[in-house]
Image: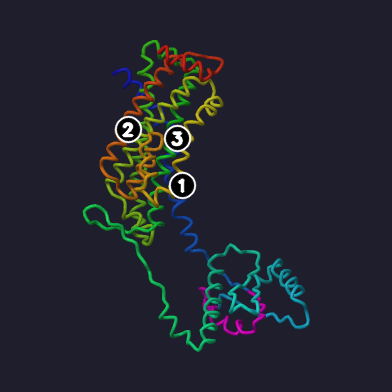
Amino acid sequence: MRKMLIVVRREYLDRVKKKSFLIGTILGPVLMALLLFMPALLFRFSPEMLTSVAVIDHSGAIYPHLERALPDTLPDGSAMFRLREEQVDGATLEQTRRRLAAEVENDALDGYIVIPADVVETGKVVFYGKRVGDIKTLERIESALSTIVIGMRLSERGIDYGEVRGLVRNVDLEAMQIKEGGEERKGGFDFVFMSTYLFIMLIYMTILMWGVAVQRSIIEEKNSRIIEVLLSSLRPGDLLFGKILGVCAVGLTQYAIWGLFGGLMVAYGLAMGGQVAAVAESLSLSTLAFFILYYLLGFLFYAAMFAGVGSVCNTDQEAQQMQQPIMFPLIFTIVIPMLIIQRPDGMFATVISLIPFFTPVVMFMRINVLMPPLWQVALSVAIMIAGIWAVGRLSAKVFRTGILMYGKKPDAREILRWLRRA
């Protein structure tokens, strides 16, 4: 035990002192924050510019109302939309469109709109432009056209649109999730997906990153023949589990640093308001506790398998081929969040969350969305502990023989012979 703790200490200190650890630990939350908040901030604060639009109105009734329906202004108080009606009297529609397309290509126009004669019946309008990714501008134009067309439809039936608009105002349905004890918290798919996906991506990335780190450490020491010196004073099992626990401690240290940074993000999210504040308010000590628990269980389970792969391989290229079956279950867990979030208490979610390869990510996902019965949580922990014990024993047997094997990579039959002998 004492010798294994020496290995744990060596692996831990060797990694946390590296500049790569510090850089990765600092850049990790920074990149995560940028991925979470930057798109919303850029969208919210993107500068608005003058938009020049030509309008071909075959109906002859829409354009006179369009300027009044687009009252948006720029920060300096000037109109945001500059509209120009195009008549197709002496020229054909194709000739007019070619001329307008040339103006768009030369940036004399931002785009042009073709309104068909039957727009009131069909509701179909086409916008042609070079920059069709400006969602806010297109939504404003679409909303203005919708208001005009709906008003005309109602007018044809003798109904005043101004009166009807207030009567047909949409209902804003806010979803509130009832938790145990009658506690309520804001729900809804967008909210649940955002708050859950962040955590499961962290579990996935750290299990994969540090599991592969165990594998590479073994391959490096095997190739440098340091492993032979270590085994002269250590049992193979002490060396194997010392490496796994040492790297596990590094991962927990990284989480602790991220936790401090996360506290600042939560404070910022609360100040920012909106959806980000709702996600920040949903964080609780129980969520963080389950997050750490399933990270530990998942890491120990997968790291034991990665260690077994590292012990039988001589290069990273060989290891990349052999580790693919191990990675498939992890990849699968980040492909199925939609199914789990929509029915966290369904048969599929329940069964798959009790399979060790999927448990760390899927069970945490279920807990974060809708707390399953405690017996299922306890059973998942027991299954993971049993899985760690079983995989650890198998990896130790492979490690004992494979760590001193050099040259040709063993095939599956040879590895099975090692397991029988051990």
Q: Amino acid at mark 2?
A: Ile
Q: Residues within 10 Å of mark 1 (few under 14, many from 20)?
A: few
Of badges 2 and 1, nearer the viewer stands 2
Q: Earlier in the sequence, mark 2 or mark 1?
A: 1
Alpha-carbon span between mark 3 and mark 1: 18 Å
Name the residue tied to disc 3: 208
Name the residue tied to disc 1: 31
Query: Where residue 351 sits in the image (x, y, percent)?
Result: 37, 40
Identify the residue at horizontal 63%, vertical 79% (top origin): 118
In magenta segment, residue 415: no
Give the secondary structure at mark 1: helix
Query: Where residue 418 sits in the image (x, y, percent)?
Result: 45, 14
Alpha-carbon span between mark 2 and mark 1: 34 Å
Label of residue 115 in the image: none
Q: Quadrant of the N terminus?
A: top left
Give the secondary structure at mark 3: helix
Q: Quadrant of the C terminus?
A: top left
Label of residue 383 in the image: 2
Q: Amino acid at mark 3?
A: Leu
Q: Earlier in the sequence, mark 2 or mark 3?
A: 3
Above or below, 64 relative to 31: below
